[in-house]
Image (cartoon, rainbow, N blue to C red):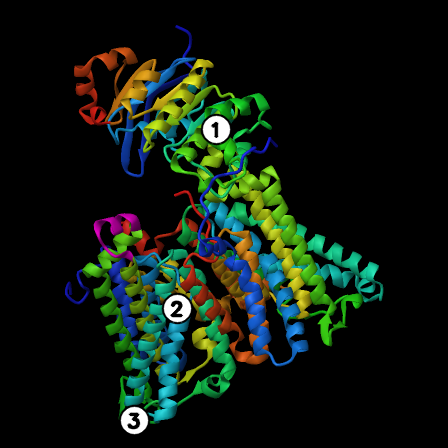
Amino acid sequence: MTAAPEHAPKMAQAALADRIAPYMPVLLVPILAVLGFLAIPSTSSWLTLTVSGLAMGMMIFIMASGLTLVFGLMDVINFGHGAFVSVGAFVGISVLLMMGHMVEAPSLMLNLTALMVAVVGAMAATGVMGWAFEKVIVEPVYGHHLKQILVTMGGLIVVEQLIIVLWGPEEIYISRPEALKGAITFAGAALEKYRLVAVAVGLVVFALMRFVLRRTKIGLIVRAGVQNGEMVQALGYRLRLVFIGVFVAGSALAGLGGVMWGLYQEVITAHMGNHAMILIFIVVIIGGLGSVEGCFIGALLVGLMQNYVAFLEPKAALISNIGLMVAILMWRPMGMIPVVKAK
Amino acid sequence: MQAVLSGDMPRSKILALILAGILICLALAPFLFPGVRTVDTAARICVFIVLVASYDLLLGYGGIVSFAHTMFFGIGAYGVALASTHMGRGFDAIAVGAAAGALVAAALALIIGLFSLRVRAIFFAMITLAVASAVAVLVSQLSGLTGGEDGLTFKTPRELGPAFKFGDKLFGVKLNGKLLAYYFVFFGALILFLGLLRVVNSPFGRVLQAIRENDFRAEAIGYRVVFYRVAATCLSAAVAALAGSLYAVWLRYVGPDTTLSMEIMIDILLMVVIGGMGTMYGAVIGATLFVLAQNYLQNLMGAASGLVEGVPILPELLSADRWLLWLGVLFILSVYFFPTGVVGRLRQGN
Amino acid sequence: MPDPILKLEGVYTNIAQYHILQGVDLEVPRGAVTMLLGRNGVGKTTTLRTIIGHWRAHKGRILLDGTDITSMPTPAIARAGVGFVPEDMGIFSDLTVEENMVLAAVSGPIDSARLDWIFAAFPPLKTFWKSEAGNLSGGQKQMLSIARVMAEERQLYLIDEPTKGLAPAIISTMAKALKDLKDQGASILLVEQNFAVAKALGDSANVMDDGRMIWSGEMQQLATDAELQERLMGLSLEAH
């Protein structure tokens, strides 16, 4: 781009508290991990739980990121987002089942190839479905929240039922690719291989997304559009197309999340997406609707919380995340990283 | 008549006739349609009219979408069930359970409302969905208290049971406790419905509608938008809980599937939309149509599915189990093309 | 007289149930500054927003360089060469000054000569080039909003109240930048409440009242005729 300024900005130094405030959400993740460490008696259990919490968080992030951006960009709230998770899981797992020999072979290369094919298939299917969903279900109700909620909920029901029509009503049990079964031992803690892979995939997706949003022009348009869509159009960008692109990308990511979630649970049902929506909503609310970074941090918090509490008191796991949401909303009513809207 | 209906007349001859027809049918159901199944259907209609009407107070009058309505419904039902189990059968247990259920529901609604409506109405939809799902999971996990997935079967007062007889027969109908139970539900529902009608036609109801139309303007005029919305939420939750109590009394059983499930939440949404949002009479029409269709249309679908046997996919699409698929389609189409529902159409036709 | 760059013919615009514009006729000549004046709430901002396509005209025609743009989508109007500075500045506050400018140049990177020109007009933008635009002061934000339309050469500049709420020193920076733009031969349609600025910049003037154009003529004539001002705009201009 262009030359940097020669002299330093002369903005006033803010007070310490003000300077920490923007980083507070990021700090919450290690704080929660430390709290977990204090509450959980055994270090190795804590490590196992932390890894599985992070893995879960990454998967929720992948599923939730599209939802939060879609809302930020066009003020569209998609209650049917979970449908993409379910469809992604069913398509991906079906592909994996078709390539059974590659999945069962004890070769990492073959396993990963099969997984890649499954993921690409799932993302392509959910991407196309996202495009259709946007056209048929969402577009007619732009700017009308009440109808959006009702109609997208209706869309979710229809998609869930169609899954049952196509794949049958029974839940499908699956096993992970051979090379991703089992665990490695680290510092006395058993860390499941699959969870480590999930963490890695989540980090890659987050890094990629940040790169696109920060370093490319299309990313700038998306970020600007979240704040003031009208102005983005007045500059000459077709926000509608950008929005469809984001919707499709978000749907494809939900599909990716669905495959990962299905392999994580080792069982898939038509309703799995809708169940995941509970955590997804909590994550996008506490993150701040429209904020990808907030969504990432929120997802990690929810994943860790869920795993720590499930270990300490299984019945309280889901409620504890509601508690987390309440606490964060008391602290910041618009979520951890609120998106500043122009109007 | 004006006074009973709080001045909210049907404003359409056909609508008035249909409403009168439904009222008469429900009032005389045990005599007009004797039979266990039909009376059960009538009782379900009574309960759902109240439940849907209380939901419409939020959705149609307040413009707020909630996914926790079945949670409140369930709280009322479980309230009666728990009170009857622990206090022993009796009207006092029903009263205590219903009152406690309504209070808990209102308190919970207050908390959720304060958290979400303060910021933006859309939070409310998401938060209620999360909370209601968490509660449903919790109820099935705490099996010691709630009976878990199996639910709770309990005894209602002897006077409301089939074993209690207070006469021989009237027009060929046995005068027993089941008949009394039906009228308990019927009059309970009628009173609650007329109460809701009064609320929406009071100054409070009109402010609520003004807020729905334009919340900035309402705020500017000086109405405290959050206060009105939260109050509507609490009231709606309390009435839903009372409807749940009536339902529990009728079924003498509560379980997650009959009161808490997401499926019932979707049924409620559908009834409101089909009947017509923003009018209490829509709840009457919506609930009646829907419960009747649910009971009788499913058989029809099963028959249709049998007819197309051999054709690929079609039998699965038409199978009675895929009832929800068609409801979903119907739902989307109604929101697009039929947003004022049956009542809106009838009033328009005037 | 050559064809005007912009021509409005009997434009009506409704917002919800309100009839805001009721038959606006307006001509913006090339290479000159056309003032759009009038009391608050008479439809000046709505006129600009209707031209850029944020609101839709229900009746009438809008011609840009002879082409009918009345029902074109906003991005297409912008790409046809219309630069717009909204009343609320429309700054992307989470983006840096640099990123705001990158977005403003639709057709590609800004060339360095143009950037030097912008920096010369608004030195603080160079200082805070890498800072988030949300941290700028009100005046600096206004500078950024003007700089954004200067990022590329436009056929027509629509600028809504660039001096609103600014300190006198910054108003003169702003006026100087606009004068600069004018000297380069730009066609500008300017809404301005500050009469001194209007007098200094305007070539022709159009006065609106109640959703219609009630007077069009030379700015000079309006500036020297106190009675005319009084009649057209009441006391509101005097107060500024």
Q: Amino acid at mark 1?
A: Pro
Distance CA(mark 3)–CA(mark 1): 95 Å
Name the residue that disc number 2 marks.
B69
Which residue is at 44% across, 74% downward? B260
Q: Secondary structure at mark 2?
A: helix
Q: Is residue B217 magenta?
A: yes
Q: Are marks 1 and 2 on the same chain?
A: no
Q: Is residue A278 magenta?
A: no
Report the residue marked by disc 3. B165
The dominant secondary structure in magenta is: helix
Circles 2, 3 touching at the beta carbon (< 8 Å) = no
Q: Residues within 10 Å of mark 3 (few under 14, many from 20)?
A: some
Q: Nearer the viewer, residue A104 or C219?
A: C219
Residue A74 seen in the figure: yes
Q: Which residues are magenta?
A: B215-225
**Disc 2 packing (10 Å; few <14; some 14–19; many ≥20):** many
Identify which amino acid the numbered label 3 is placed on: Lys
Q: Is residue C42 above or below residue B31?
A: above
Pinpoint the chain carrying mark 1. Answer: C
Residue annotated with mark 1: C123
Residue B238 appears at what percent x and percent y? Answer: 31, 72
Please provide percent x and percent y for residue C153: 51, 21
Classify mark 3: helix, strand or loop: strand
